[in-house]
Image: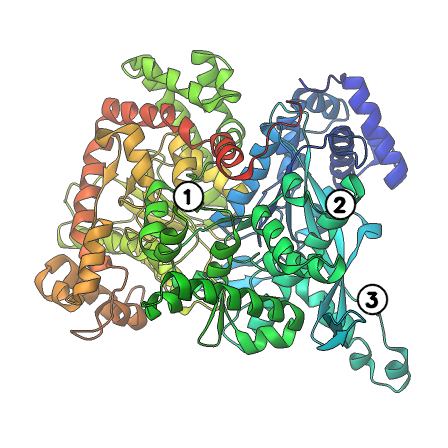
Amino acid sequence: MINKFTVNEIKERIEEKLLHHFGREAKSATKHQIYKSTCLVVRDIMSELWNKNHDLIDSHKQKQIYYLSMEFLPGTSLKNNIFNLEIENVFKEALNEFGENIETLYEMEPDAGLGNGGLGRLASCYLDAIATCGMAGHGFSICYEYGIFKQKIKDCKQIEEPDDWLNLGDIWLIPKYDEAEEVHFGGKLEEVWDENGKMKLIHRDYTTVIGIPKDMLITGYGSEVVNTLRLWKSTSPISINMELFAKGKYLKSMEEKHFAEVISKILYPEDAHVEGKSLRIMQQYFFISASMQALVKRHLIRFGTLDNFHEKVGVHINDTHPTMAIPELMRIFLDEYEYEWDKAWEIVCKTITYTNHTIMSEALEKWPEDLFAKLLPRLHSIVVEINRRHTVMLMREFPNNEALRNEMAIIYDGKLKMANLCVAAAHKVNGVSALHSKIIKEKLFNGFVKLTPDKFTNVTNGIAYRRWLCQANPKLSDFIEELCGSEFKYNAMNLENLMKYKEDSNVLERLSIIKRENKIRLADYIKKHNNIIVNPDSIFDVQVKRLHEYKRQLLNLFHIMDLYNQLKENPNKDIYPRTFIFGAKAAAGYHMAKQIISLACHLSKMLEDDPVVRDRLKIVFLENYSVSLAELIMPAADVSEQISLAGKEASGTGNMKLMINGAITLGTMDGANVEILNAVGNENIFIFGLLVDEVEKIIQSGIYRPWAYCHENKYIANIIKLMTDGIDGIVFGDIINSLTAGYNSNADQYFVLADFDSYKMAQEDVSLAYQNKTKWGQMSITNIAKSGIFSADRSIKEYADKIWGIKPIND
């Protein structure tokens, strides 16, 4: 235990918070007051550790990493923090003496609405691991008031509602009003010449937005190091225009305040229109400018010079959203501290590192240059100069290859290419799985690799496994500790010790019992929230992740419709009972993704209403997928669906969370699935589908004919007919057209039809294997035992060693 507290000490601290913050004694306090007071006590303990390690003047002077991400997805904090601090038992006992159950308090807490999917969850896992490894590493993002959205399913359609998570979630945020920063938008640039004949660009007539920092403290397991996730809330320096108000122009008098505050309202506003693009650019610059200004000021206080900035500060760009850190640091060095260009560029390049998370073109941000220049004129001028120098270098290196130069340009065809800016500036660039890193080197950034091959490396993603195993699945965690000791909680590689029990029938039986108990727990949730009764002895086949066509939830639904067709044709067909569980949010403006959700929900209803199939086939679509919901789903899963088209999923982390809970991966040779296969062996995973090279060959040949599959494959033809006739009375014409429209079209761009037969056969293998309980148990225990390599601790140590150059602060 890091901090040794007695039950009485914790009771007294809670009572003090109740009295000082709410004027209540424990016996008269409400549940919310008890919850908040408990959180405040935990926050105080964290603050004491934070001050010990990060006091501005007296603490360590080692290099620190600052992780910039448009999103973080920390989930709930109370359980995670007291688990990491190893103080859960004393809090349980103290609350029991108040007549309170700590589990009740856990359930009260909303998930922090700061992220959407794997990108944000990975960022949070990494902050946890940095603290666990005893290193100084902090996050920067936006304090979104309403997160991305709260998903509701009404009439089988996704409805987006505000996620008012700050109602209780703000208890973990510590406002630092005296550390606010100004961020400037719009305006114009003016050339000013000094007496030495040197020209400076002065930014005038801009609109000011104030960034107020709200700090969330981040703990690591068994570590005294507590770090910070700094979240910026936007506001205006002008609350109200009194002159306009006096004239009766009430709404206009508040316009500037609303303009500023909308920046931190919603994560990922729809950007199909100019207003949405403008807001996204403003969001990105807002948190980047505020963060970089704060970093530079803090560094100067500690060291008195910026010459050693890169030696003490690392700035990591998580995907392309935070790319503006590069020109913003240049702006600060050039304009505020009068560095010469070459020296400023050298420091910035030695400071910046970049993780690419996708090869999908829509996620490799390209901003319209005219819009960027209008909103951020000074930053635009800096990017123009970076591009000019970059172009000169490209002409020197590739004089006879205009196509390659255009591909590598930072500004081209009226667009700013943010990924290219990242690669041009960063001293290290990494992919997030071995396959993904190979693809970005060979295809996405091939020209840059020719120039600086040593710049590129790989760090396979990892997860905060204690959260996904020890906290989410305590019965399994306790059983592992009973078998192998507690060392696995400190080093995930010790899970390998489970392999000695692979042939132990008693151990396999215990694992099966634990899995069934977790399935019953999820079944109870499903009955309560979906009014569907599921069989815990059926195969729980799980696909939970962001809804995108490349992730191919549609392929999963095709297989379910095929099973339905087979049962309708032959009601006596031997099909083992299956429960297919989906959880996914579709972007608000993503029509096809919303159609796929609607298809899943209507198909669920149709199966449930059909007495021939409802006891053997179930679909459950769980609304508002979140970290907390994932913590309920992962321990109950039998099958982990990781079925993206090969070459499209950079890594995945859901595959790792499911694996460590004993689910068996059903997947393509994509992302980290390849490394899971290498870890567990062919006999402990179900692999299907086209390989990356095969996909690429078909695309380049231009001969893919999806319509032919509909004519030549009776199962696919029957599925298309079912959808045409109507699922629960609804014809899904847009989905059918996206797969089949035209004989020589761009239909089925994610090869659902091409991979269907292989997927269908793999699913048959799943069913057969599951019915052999010994074999399935051995596969499950092998997956748990081999999952240690996917710990975020391992990932962070690789980042620290290969990319960031940081060490534990007490070394």
Residue located farthest toward the bottom when viewing the structure as drawn: 247
Q: Is residue 265 visible?
A: no
Q: How far from the left and from the top, in percent, is residue 345? A: 60, 55
Residue 513 left/right relative to 317: left
Q: Point out the tag, 1 or 2, that comes first from the N-terminus.
A: 2
Q: Point out the tag, 3 or 2, that comes first from the N-terminus.
A: 3
State the separation of the CA atoms marked 3 and 2.
Answer: 30 Å
Asked whether the beta carbons under mark 3 and mark 2 sit within 8 Å of each other, the answer is: no
- Number of the label disc, if any, that sits on residue 454: 1
Residue occupying image coordinates x 56% and y 35%: 805
Residue located farthest toward the left when viewing the structure as drawn: 712
Q: How far from the left and from the top, in percent, is residue 773? A: 25, 25
Residue occupying image coordinates x 28% and y 32%: 678
Q: Nearer the viewer, residue 198 or 1?
A: 198
Residue occupying image coordinates x 74% and y 59%: 338
Q: On the image, numbered disc 2 is attached to which residue?
A: 305
- Give the answer, above or below, for where 493 lies relative to 757: above
- Number of the label disc, if any, that sits on residue 237: 3
State the separation of the CA atoms marked 3 and 1.
Answer: 46 Å
Q: How far from the left and from the top, in percent, is residue 683? A: 21, 29
Q: Point out the tag, 3 or 1, that comes first from the N-terminus.
A: 3
Kind of residue at disc 2: Thr
Residue occupying image coordinates x 65% and y 38%: 64
